[in-house]
Image: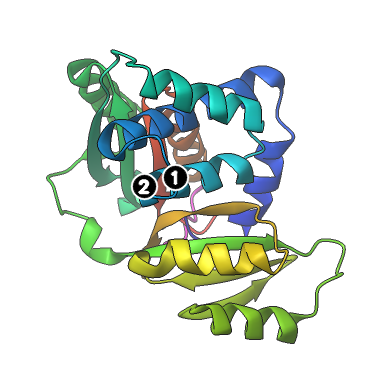
Amino acid sequence: MAGHSKWNNIKQKKGKTDAQRGKIFTKISRELIVAVKEGGGDPASNAKLRDAIAKARAANVPNDNIKRVIEKAVGGDNTTYEVGTYEGYGPSGVAVIVETMTDNKNRTASDMRHYFDKYGGNLGTEGCVAWSFDRKGVLVIDNEGETLDEDAVMLDALDAGAADFTFEETVFVVYTPTETFGDVRAMLEEKGYAFLSAQVEMVSQNVIKLEAPEDQAKMEKLLAMLEDNDDVQNVWHNWEE
């Protein structure tokens, strides 16, 4: 997702209703289950699980909930989730990547086609827009109260191995290579930093502005439908909202 408004969106999600927070917890629970099934229930030896736990904590998922999901997965949860990626275009050629985890691939594929078609876009073939994104680790540190010093945070981030650092509105954004994301996050956590968001993302290389109000409305509705779908884990795009 591109544009300064992304960080405002993160804050808005934290203030959502219980039902909406429940959807976020459901999505993250799937990531935890898949991580456990792929690498076991010990985060010390399962980097993917460590990353999923960090994402859960950044989203304010209670530790008891995290522990319960992991224990259930270790105990032999029979639900199987298949990971998928859909690429396509929104109104006026906005590039969109949708990452999913589903127990019914046919249902999810049908939903994706319906959403794109309904709101002025279309699904494309694999790789049609991924070339215009870079996969990076992204850590977002809140500084709304302006209690953190920009230079100090930047030095800590670079010392931890960050590749890039920016300040946007009231947050610091730390970028890392995907292979060192977990190590950088752990070192910053040891220094006492907490994150609004902590995950590997598809970061757009360029942005598109939608001038027509009807295109803006369609794009907003497309994103809302995608993010409301339980099978959708992440939505990345290059619209400058």
Mark 2 closeness class: few <14, some 14–19, many ≥20 residues within 10 Å: some
Residue holding disc 2? 46
Q: Is residue 147 visible?
A: yes
Q: Amino acid at mark 2?
A: Asn
Tell me, for residue 160, which label it has, or none.
Answer: none
Mark 1 closeness class: few <14, some 14–19, many ≥20 residues within 10 Å: some
Outermost residue, left direction? 125
Question: What residue do we see at 54% from left, 22% from top?
Answer: 68
- Are the residues tagged 1 and 2 within 8 Å (C-beta)? yes
Q: Please state the total of marks drawn on the protein image.
A: 2
Q: Which residues are magenta?
A: 208-212
Q: Residue 168, how many percent across, how many down?
A: 66, 70
Q: Amino acid at mark 1?
A: Pro
Question: What residue do we see at 67% from left, 38% from top?
Answer: 60
Image quadrant assignment for residue 21: top right
Given residues 216 and 234, the one toward you in this image is: 234
Q: Residue 141, how many percent across, how many down?
A: 67, 62
Outermost residue, top direction? 78
Asked if the magenta segment contains residue 231, the reply would be no
Given residues 173 and 222, the one toward you in this image is: 173
What colour scheme was applied to this rendering of the protein? rainbow
Given residues 57 and 136, the one toward you in this image is: 57
Given residues 223 and 42, the one toward you in this image is: 42
Question: What residue do we see at 35% from left, 52% from top?
Answer: 94
Quarter of the picture holding the C terminus: bottom right
Tell me which secondary structure the magenta stretch mostly adopts: loop
Question: What residue do we see at 69% from left, 57% from top?
Answer: 194
Tell me, for residue 43, which label it has, or none.
Answer: 1
